[in-house]
Amino acid sequence: MRRVYLDNNASTPVLPEVLEAMRPYYAEHFGNASSIHHHGQETRAAVERARESVAKLLGCRPAEVVFTSGGTEADNLAIFGVLNQGLLHPGDHVVSSTIEHHAVLNSCKQLQERGVEVTYVPVDGRCLINPDDVRRALRSNTKLVTIMMANNETGVLQPVDEIGRICADADVFFHTDAVQAASKVPIRVKEIGCDLLSISGHKLHAPQGVGALYVRKGTILEPLFYGGSHERSRRAGTENVPGIVGLGKAAELAMKAFEHGEDGEMAAQRDRLQSAVLGSVESAGVNGDGVPRVPNTTNIYFDYIEGEALVIALDLKGLAVSTGAACSSGAIEPSHVLTAMGLRADRARASLRFSLGKQNTAEDVDFATQLVPASVERLRELSPLYNKAAVST
Amino acid sequence: MSSAKTIAVAMSGGVDSSTVAAMLRAEGYNVVGLTMQLWNQRRLAGRAGMPETVTGRCCSLDDVYDARRVAETIGIPYYVVNHEDRFERDVVRPFVQEYLSGRTPIPCSLCNNHLKFDQLLTVARQIGADAVATGHYARVEFDDSRGRWLLKRPTDRSKDQTYFLFGLTQEQLSRTLFPLGGMNKPDVRELARKHGLALAEKPDSQEICFVPGGDYKNFLDAYLAEQGDSLPETAGELVTTDGRVIGEHGGIHNFTVGQRKGLGVATGSPLYVLQIKGDTRQVVVGDAENLYSQTLLTRRINLISVDDLGEPTRVSVKIRHRHEPAAATIEKTGADEILVTFDQPQRAITPGQAAVFYDGEIVVGGGWIS
């Protein structure tokens, strides 16, 4: 059966060039990057080359890049690094948003349990945060603002530049989770004005299990765990050299792709997918329409259906997309992001996320544009709600 | 996907449904494994007398893990579908309400009617499956002479689950498979071993799946507290059959008809709960012989083997899951009401339970005891 994967915001395949770059670092160049001998020097050099590539992707200095095990660790290091450094005390205040990834949301919840107050700024119906809301949320004891750069479910880009200026004016730490933005839109940390920025390898065609945190020079973080003095004592533990090399290579490829305008091509494919689907399905629309989005994502609601059933039906026909958030059992719960946008519960449950990756072809998009309308129609035929609505109109 | 029929198997993570999936797969069907997420066991943990860590059976991560492993072993796609909202609305709330009204509910029948053979059948159709198969011990077959789908007792009478399935409609039965209906449990375990399923020795589950440890009283307290409701006043008087007050009790939901222990009164002869009066919150107690009655009234009827009941009909009737069907005559006494008259008086007929009518091995239908 032909299988098409349009769930790249969940994870991306490692690109062939990335895998090739990583390959020697398993068996051939296996040394511990902290060792003083030849084998160690070899891997140390590879790690530092990768750091330079990631620094270029983010527009920062190599020394400002800390490699982690992924986006979740990067977010945790950013938030608890500031907290544990003694800069954040019970009674202090943190600003976040209602649409963050759980890595940030649950970290904030943990802060609350430790006596820190957290304000979650809302989004509007298009999934956009108003910077003025962030400004208004600031208090004299606000120590940290953590707001994502691009939302994972809608792809909507948040006004992080403006939020960065607000934080700079107020002298508040600003962390942004850029896991869904990195390699999709150019990132210049200086323009954003953030102190901390998280990325994840497997969202940009590097492997799972590697990520990075940009830490602005002069920002002192308390490490999450204790051990050797790796990563300038900010992240103990022997480096995941193959993963780091993969992340470096993926960052390098992402920069080249920007130079070649591939982000624009991806946006065109996404727009084609979106308009083809909307053109052949009634009572459907885009969540996060009319605002800047990353080029690979579109989130579409199909009224009168259960997104869960549609995802299963499509998977059985060979198309992988997603809906909502999987809970620990694997069952789907309505997306907190769509709910925060003010969608009715039934529309939130009727929404699907399509996210493209570099490996996707125009034929993949064709496959989806043919399969999705037919599957939606089938589900609607079985929907008592839809038939009732059809009768009443 | 090939042109073979597609069957959705309701997988609980137990031996029975896992074996069904393996059997159908071996027979060449396109099999899709589905587990219904019905209740979050952690939800009430630590509340009002509930244990901090809950080891209840329903939808536990362990069961989902087991089901997923089986799906992987036999090579079928597998999905967990979320029906928590419907389960709470159609099973949990009525369960709580029944207890508070002095009846003894059976949530499994409600779950079968509203979830497994309704929601799950819908999901199955939506994803392109022709039928749903489950690990229930029962048989379903089409009878040409009657032109109806029949529900029949299984070969392994000790595992008979037809009592919980009396609410199935013709439409539901027409799209349902019970592949274990002709098998004995030991054979099922043997088959599970043969298919290489790691859970072949997993013990059977018995208790109500969402009530950990079977302690429904704690569950009621915890659920009501979570809903922001306190337990309504259910305490009242213990009275004898002639209306004499002989004591007080802590709440009608603590009692079930036929119960002997825990009445908290000492008399010469053992006393049994004969009746629970929801409106006056009185619990009527009396001697063992008063527990027997010859008739019962059922409402919310579902008939399977016949379209309607004409003349009074001779059947055998089962009034609880572990009850040997007893000879009786059933007759229609209202649009949705059937009177059951037993040949011999039956012990502890309990409102809230189902009365299921059998003609030999065929399920005629059933209703809820009122």
Image: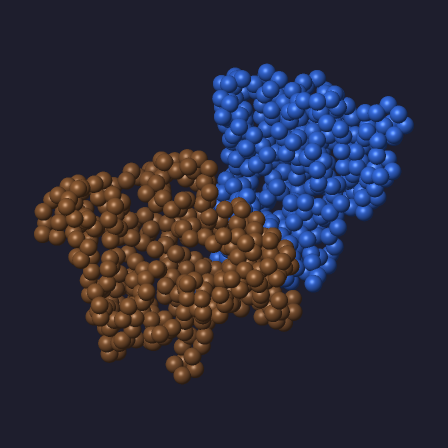
Residue most extreme to the bottom: B145
Residue A374 image-quadrant placement: bottom right
Tell me the shade of chain B: brown
- The answer to whether B275 appears left or right of A194 in the picture is left
Q: Relative to B4, is A310 above or below?
A: above
Residue A331 x, y percent position in the rendering = 53, 49
Please indicate, yes or no, whether residue A389 appears anywhere in the rendered image: no
Q: Is residue B196 or residue A2 the one in the foreground?
A: B196
Residue B46 image-quadrant placement: top left
Q: Relative to B333, is A340 above or below?
A: above
Residue B78 x, y percent position in the rendering = 59, 56
Coloring basis for residues: by chain
Q: Is residue A174 or residue B53 the one in the foreground?
A: B53
- The answer to whether B110 appears left or right of B331 in the picture is right
- The answer to whether A57 appears left or right of A388 in the picture is right
Picture quarter with the N terminus of chain B: bottom right
- Residue at left offset 55%, top offset 43%: A328
Residue B356 image-quadrant placement: bottom left
Residue most extreme to the right: A38
Q: Is residue A145 or residue A36 the one in the foreground?
A: A36
- Residue at left offset 63%, top offset 58%: B196
- Residue at left offset 49%, top offset 52%: B203
Residue B189 x, y percent position in the rendering = 54, 60
- Residue at left offset 76%, top offset 37%: A243
* Total labels drawn: 0
Please indicate, yes or no, whether residue B196 appears anywhere in the rendered image: yes
Picture quarter with the C terminus of chain B: bottom left
The chain painted blue is A
Residue A92 x, y percent position in the rendering = 52, 19
- The answer to whether A241 appears left or right of B294 in the picture is right
